[in-house]
Amino acid sequence: MIPAAVLFDMDGTLIDSEPYWLEAETELMAKFGYAWTKEDQATCLGGPLDRVGRYMSELAGEVEDWQFFTNSLVEGVTSKFLNGLTFVPGAREMLLEIKEREIPLALVSASPRVLVDAALALAPKNIFLTSVSNNEVTRSKPDPEGYLLAATLLGVDIEDCLVLEDSKTGVSAGLASGAHVLAIPHLVEISPDPHLRILPTLKDRNFDDVLLLFSDSPSFGRSMQ
């Protein structure tokens, strides 16, 4: 019952970047006289970026097109990333334990490559065998393309993989790929699914705790080695 690979989402699952996104979104929309709310943040959680850009453009009265908002948002978040990043509680410890068990790891994000590379620079060296950003796919989350590509790059079957996600968009992508999914929800509620388990936090949890959650899933047991 050990997964062939573990595929980590980035924003909100691995690194605590959501405060940076919220700050950048708030600052950008304030320039157009709009007060960004927690509800707006929840609506945009998990991307994809073009959807976020279109949403912001609409709220701003379409005085700029969606690409302007997308590009401006990425620039704002990138500048904030340069000041340093922190891991989501328990995420770094989980990574190191999975690595110690010699289970392949991949980082799969709906963010652009510049932000993924910033996160990789923060992570323990060479802990991820591969990474997939928004730049490497034609369809971002909730489409499963990113997770399917990661499994292909690792040379494993996606059905034998475990995905860790925090958003509805990401969970949908993981489930659509055929993987089993562990959700660590942030700001939103996640609907149940036979291939989905939920933990409120990774803090003070180990990988055996995660595997135990899937012990009652016959399909999980059959697909793991």
Image: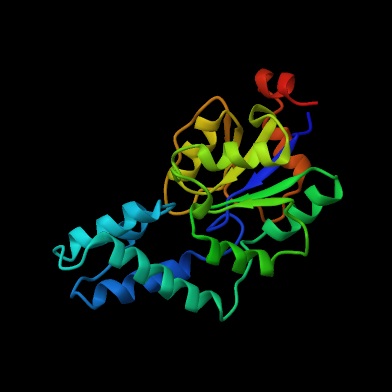
Classify 77 as above or below 4.
below
Classify 175 as above or below 103.
above
Percent position of residue 4, x then y: 75, 34
> What's the residue at 45%, 40% (across, down)?
190
**Horizontal side of residue 89 vs 209, given as left or right:** left
> Dividing the picture into quarters, in which one does residue 5 lie?
top right
Classify 167 as above or below 219.
below
Classify 146 as above or below 46.
above
> What's the residue at 66%, 36% (across, down)?
152
Q: 85 or 182, which is in the foreground?
A: 85
Percent position of residue 79, x then y: 48, 78
> What's the residue at 68%, 34% (across, down)?
161
Count of numbered circles in the view: 0
| Quadrant of the snapshot with the C terminus | top right
Coloration mode: rainbow
> Dividing the picture into quarters, in which one does residue 25 lie?
bottom left
Percent position of residue 17, x then y: 52, 66
| Quadrant of the snapshot with the N terminus | top right
Percent position of residue 140, x then y: 45, 46
**Horizontal side of residue 196 vs 57, given as left or right:** right
> What's the residue at 57%, 56% (across, down)?
10
Q: 137 or 197, which is in the foreground?
A: 137
**Horizontal side of residue 112 vs 8, given as left or right:** left
Q: 18 or 28, which is in the foreground?
A: 28
